[in-house]
Image (cartoon, rainbow, N blue to C red):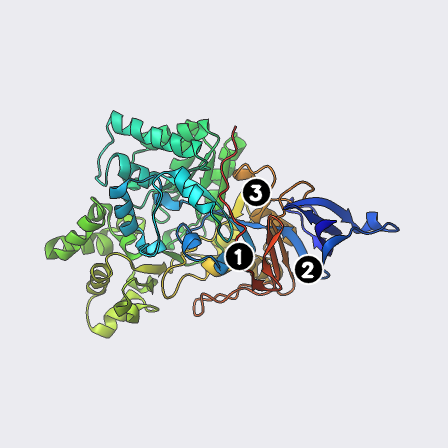
Amino acid sequence: MEDLVIRDADVVDGSGAPSYRADVVVDDGRIVSIVREAAAAGCQRPRAVRELDAEGLVLSPGFVDMHAHSDLALLRDPDHSAKAAQGVTLEVLGQDGLSYAPVDDRTLAEVRGAIAGWNGPGDDIDFDWRSVGEYLDRLDRGIAVNAAYLIPQGTVRALAVGWEDRAATPAELDHMRRLVAEGLAQGAVGLSSGLTYTPGMYAPDAELTELCRVVAAYGGYYCPHHRSYGAGALEAYAEMVALAREADCPLHLAHATMNFGVNEGRAPELLALLDEALAAGADITLDTYPYTPGSTTLAAMLPSWANEGGPAAALARLADDGTAERVRHHLEAVGSDGCHGVPIEWDTIEISGVTDPALTDFVGRTVQESADARGESPWTTARRLLVADRLGTTIFQHVGHEENVRTIMRHRVHTGGSDGILQGTKPHPRAYGTFPHYLGHYVRELGVLTLEECVAHLTSRPAARLRLPDRGLVREGYRADLVLFDPETVAAGSTFENPRRLPTGIPHVLIDGRFVIEDGHRTDTLAGRAIRRAPL
């Protein structure tokens, strides 16, 4: 007998086609047969060791989080219900140009400090890897959900060049090419950039183009957090499209939003730019999260020159009164490149997490509110936090526009990505709620997408971008990465007030045919593994 038959499910198979009712049989981690209701009439129905009654539930492929920040969380937290309970069966790590491989001892320490706000300082992690392949091997020891990895261009630059704002020498560029090639050969699916974060932002387009040529040769894709999501956002998108086309490299635009007041209502202009490139033969996809506020670190708001040289150099500048005043002027009057060229509005910057418990009183308040309560300027408060928290403070930035969010998620190359930062006292609810929020709010309540369209956005489209030949669809022979949810009740439990509340309406999640969520509860199964790039 086979392992499992899922009986009387409404199958939304990920292709975008209409749903159908069927029994789905799983054995040895794969879907071995699908018996549609009409075909089963008058025939003996499939049997298995276990039968699961799916009456009233939708069966879909597992959801793919195309933009995750679980690089250390997967190692730290075997439960990982933040993603497993949403129906996420695969996360793409190594985002925004900064992560933990490839590194040497020096750059590992620097990167740990630079992105402590994203992933924690990592004091509880045994960093027993240095290469991309060794990191993927570490994931293979057993994790909650599957994970793919993007080579982080900022980390590569830190390793080959350092944290200085200067052009790479020919030898350094060759070194970066080798690092990218090695990471791809070891299983990475592509290259990410964080072009508003140091040191990745110091790379000119010519350097990025050369790295993307390597990515294209290995069948990967380029995933940039581009140079501006505010003033100059459209120009920044166009820059990435032109760069990827020059390198003949597939392009996936990370958290493709149009934020800040200067971009209200301008999503159609972005989509027109993409449609023109797609019509000309470009290979482009994008991901978004279904919320308006963004989330990053407070240090990310600083002008790039203030972060040059790495975290220690940035802290030294903040400690100097004269230099700190220059930083304030760039933030408040000029519009720093870290804040996307827009003068910062302190009443939109809400503190969401700190690494120093002594600073928790700041969490849940905007910088402006904390400054007013203290009778000081917002910059004084922000500077105090940056120094005392060693740059580890995370923020919400309330600068998004709902009409832009809805317009972009309708596009035919759109996929879902949480951009979920799991650290901090008050993480963004997207970390725990992105996928049920799409299904509950934007499908059932608003009708922005049909159920079949939305499932395709969250399953087969990202699987195609990742070149996964046997995931992303409910098909015979495919991996049994599956989600069962109630379309009438599925919803994000997480809110800005209670961000770690788990979703409702997702009773079962399977990875490789093994239950990681069963009857609404996390099992002790660690079915996840590293998903390596398929050879060309």
Quarter where residue 489 is shown: bottom right
Whether residue 418 sits left or right of residue 305 in the image: it is: right
Q: Is residue 40 visible?
A: yes
Residue carrying label 3 = 461
Rendering coords of residue 87 (x, y %): 56, 55
Who's the residue at 38% across and 36% down the image? 239
Q: Secondary structure at mark 2?
A: loop
Whether residue 485 sits left or right of residue 285 in the image: it is: right
Is residue 157 or residue 183 the one in the foreground?
183
Q: Secondary structure at mark 3?
A: helix
Rendering coords of residue 511 (x, y %): 58, 50
**Looking at the picture, which amino acid does disc 3 mark?**
Arg
Is disc 1 in contact with disc 2, using a CB cutoff of under 8 Å? Answer: no
Is disc 2 in contact with disc 3, using a CB cutoff of under 8 Å? Answer: no
Who's the residue at 57% across and 58% down the image? 442
Whether residue 324 sits left or right of residue 146 in the image: it is: left
- The residues tagged by marks 2 and 3 sit, at their Cα atoms, a distance apart of 22 Å
**Looking at the picture, which amino acid does disc 1 mark?**
Ala
The number of numbered badges drawn on the structure is: 3
Q: Residues within 10 Å of mark 2 (few under 14, many from 20)?
A: many
Q: Earlier in the sequence, mark 1 or mark 2?
A: 2
Who's the residue at 37% across and 32% down the image? 180
Q: Is residue 237 visible?
A: no
Q: Earlier in the sequence, mark 1 or mark 3?
A: 1
Against 56, residue 303 (above or below) is above
**Looking at the picture, which amino acid does disc 2 mark?**
Leu
Rendering coords of residue 137 (x, y %): 44, 42
Q: Secondary structure at mark 1?
A: helix
Quarter where residue 237 is shown: top left
Rendering coords of residue 251 (x, y %): 46, 36
Residue carrying label 1 = 84
Is residue 73 or residue 334 the one in the foreground?
73
